[in-house]
Amino acid sequence: MDAETAIRLAVKSGKTVFGANRTLHLLRTGSPRVIVLAANAPSEVTTEIDKLSSVNKVPIHKFRSNSWDLGQICGRPHMVAAMAVLEPGDADITALTGAGKK
C-alpha cells in the first residue's frame, strides 16, 4: 500500500486531525500514532513538530507533495500542512511510518 492510499484510508476509516496547530496540540497533550507533514509546511511548524515528535517518539511521514495535494487526498477543500493520525482504521500504517521497509 502506498502512502497516498494509506492516508485516504486513515481519513475515511480511522480517526485523523487536520491542521498544524491541532497537530502540535496533540503532540503536546496526547500521542498520535503518526504525523503527516506536507513538503511545503512552514519551517517553524516543521521544526516544532520535529522536536515534539522526537521527544514523544511519534514517527513523521514527510509527504512528497505540497499542502494543496495533501488536502485533496484527505478530501478537504483547503490546504493541509500537517495532520495527525490517531487511529489508522483500515489503513496500513507501516506505509506511513516506514516500518517494514528495507
Image: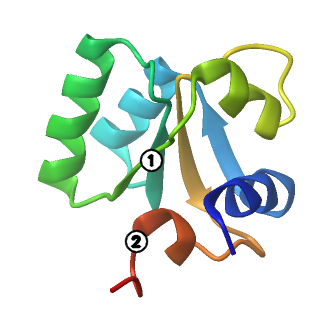
Where residue 15 sits: x, y (%)?
Answer: 70, 54
At horizontal 71% and vertical 28% (from top left) the residue drawn is 69
Q: Which mark is residue 59?
A: none
Where residue 10 sits: x, y (%)?
Answer: 73, 59
Where residue 48 sits: x, y (%)?
Answer: 21, 26
At horizontal 76% and vertical 61% (from top left) the residue drawn is 5
Element class at badge 2: loop
Q: CA distance from mark 1 to mark 2?
A: 12 Å
Earlier along the polypeptide chain: callout 1 or callout 2? 1
Looking at the image, residue 81 sits to the left or right of residue 89; the answer is left
Q: Name the quarter where the C terminus is drawn.
A: bottom left
- What's the amino acid at mark 1? Ile
At horizontal 33% and vertical 41% (from top left) the residue drawn is 27
Q: Quadrant of residue 62?
A: top left
Q: Which mark is residue 98?
A: 2
- What's the amino acid at mark 2? Gly
The residue closer to the viewer here, 58 or 79, is: 79
